[in-house]
Amino acid sequence: MQSQPVIVCTGFHRSATSTLANYLANAGLDLGEDLVAPHISNVKGHYEDLKAVKLHDEQLKAVGSNWQFHDEVVLDPGPDFLYEYINARSAKSYSWSVKDPRVCLFLEQWEQALGSLGSYVFIVRHWSGCIESLLNRHSRELAYGLMDVTGENLHLKIWAQPDIAAKAWLAYNKRMLKFAKAHPDKVILCTQRALFEGAPIINSINTRFGFELDTNIEPPFDSSLFNDSASTNVKDSLSLALQRQLDSVWEELLNIANFSSANELPAYSFSAEQDEKYYLEYKDKVTKLSVTASVFNKSLLKKEVDISLLSTLDENICIDYLVDLRSQSIDEQSLNKVKVHFNEAVGKVQLELARLLQVNKRFIDAIHVYHKCIALGTNYPYVNMLLGECYQAIEEYELALYYFDKAIAANLKNPTFYVKKAGCLIKLSKPELAENEFLIGIKLLGYLAPLALNYSEFLVQQDKIELALEVLAQSEKTHPAVLSKIAHLKLARDYKSGVSTYYELMAQQVKGKNKFSWLNKITSNISCANAERDFVVRCFKHWAKL
């Protein structure tokens, strides 16, 4: 690794890390080539390198967790997963930065991987403000998407488990606190309020870490995008014991902060009269609706299942078992037991075994089982597509293209097959052929959502945002993903007009939908009265904006 300085920028979700990263980028730091696209929750961009986000998500997924990690499992990987990424970034830029809230969970691994090259900038925000912002973000996604979800859905989980966001804040911030205390010479810690009040972050980075960033640039702060108050429901949904833990960590962070505001007290907003009207209207309407039956939650099943018992069960139960395993974290030993047990199965059971192996990145094993399926007569067109995906994953691109072509030849009307082949051609650095594949699919099938969405993303990568918008405009007018993509692209082009477009599109999406029936079904997953009321009121407020 070359001797090049690196700034690691992190903080808990919704703490203004994106604003800081935007500032660093404007000052001259390379934040990465493939950044997460702007979203209504981050209209000026996230400034997160997708490759770094993926690395962190893979480590979390490996232990059965996600970005809502709250010390529910042990998370202690070695630093090896970072080396290739760090070397690739260093080969392209003399000085660079990586920003991702998930970095908080892997600070020791980054420190081991970077050594003396790493410097760290932490942004911290009072727990009430972070939780408020998360509740606002995820209620908006649910309210406008009118998604049919259970309490395990990451959007709804923060109401189904009202303390999960607070525990996640603790998990992230405890690690920053511990790291900052252990490496005070390598850390600049700034509160969100201090950042927005003009804390001299760029000057401090230059002075303390030896950078030469541009100190004359204007901070990219927009006060209209900043809300620093939290609903009292945020506090009322948490036990006093948990609040004391949160407050204790916050006080310790303030004690070691390099930059903080003169006033770091939390700002709470009390329930308005309109909030009560929303909730009473909800209560009046849902009491007249039938009670939604509880949905059987497969996650409550014991993960340690005696698979030998499945020998006595019918094919459909075996298939359900394997399908369910695909959504769970399964260790190598357990996966090997499943593979051995179902190795002699036939038909769709064998096919689901192959898909389970593929999901768990056992691509060679999956390829063998897929070929066995084909030999035994289970030869649907999408089996060829799945084979193509496996060959692509092990970088056997010519074989991948062969099987994608077989899938297309067997079913010319499946848009996903064209998308997969185009993706493989992109991997082979053949953009012209990839574009041609999208166009062939569109000519045959029209601007179906899978084709339009993936083709538009391809065009965005070619810096052809206007053409991407033209493609999406010809796609399915009410498809949620299409509407969302249009909004995101318009945000990237001009965030102020993009926000207006977003609300227009969301109004179109929810028009004519039975919101009370949807609320009745969704709130059946929420058992805490304060959390239910909070969720309902937030949904009404989102709908009122349309």
Image (spheres, rainbow, N blue to C red):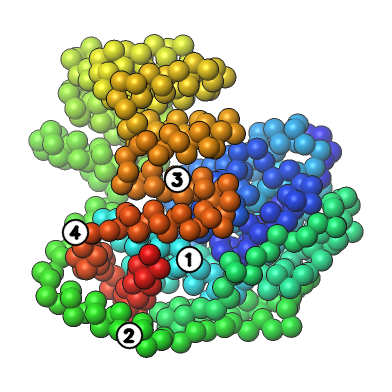
Measured from the top left, where is residue 384 in percent x and y? Answer: 31, 18
Q: Mark 4 vs mark 3: which is more N-terminal?
A: 4
Circle 1: residue type: Leu
Measured from the top left, where is residue 455 in percent x and y? Answer: 45, 30
Query: Callout 3: few (<14), some (14-19), or many (20+) C-alpha neighbours within 10 Å?
Result: many
**Residue that carries the numbered disc 2 in the rendered image:** 276
**Residue that carries the numbered disc 3 in the rendered image:** 486
Tell me the mark number nearer the camera, choosing from 4 and 3.
Answer: 3
Circle 4: residue type: Val
Tell me the mark number nearer the camera, choosing from 2 and 3.
Answer: 3
Q: Mark 2 vs mark 3: which is more N-terminal?
A: 2
In three-dimensional space, the C-alpha distance between marks 3 and 1, rounded to whole angstroms, equals 23 Å
Circle 2: residue type: Glu
User: In the depicted view, which residue is nearer to us: 264 or 455?
Assistant: 455
Circle 3: residue type: Ile
* Image vertical order of residue 140 relative to residue 4, above or below: below
Question: Which of the 4 image quarters holds residue 290?
Answer: bottom left
User: In the depicted view, which residue is nearer to us: 463 or 161?
Assistant: 463
Question: Which of the 4 image quarters holds residue 161?
Answer: bottom left
| Mark 3 residue element | helix
User: In the depicted view, which residue is nearer to us: 322 or 391?
Assistant: 391
In three-dimensional space, the C-alpha distance between marks 4 and 2, rounded to whole angstroms, equals 29 Å
Q: Mark 1 vs mark 2: which is more N-terminal?
A: 1
Image point (53%, 17%), residue name = 432
Tell me the mark number nearer the camera, choosing from 1 and 2.
Answer: 2
**Residue that carries the numbered disc 1 in the rendered image:** 134
**Residue that carries the numbered disc 4 in the rendered image:** 295
In three-dimensional space, the C-alpha distance between marks 4 and 3, rounded to whole angstroms, equals 34 Å
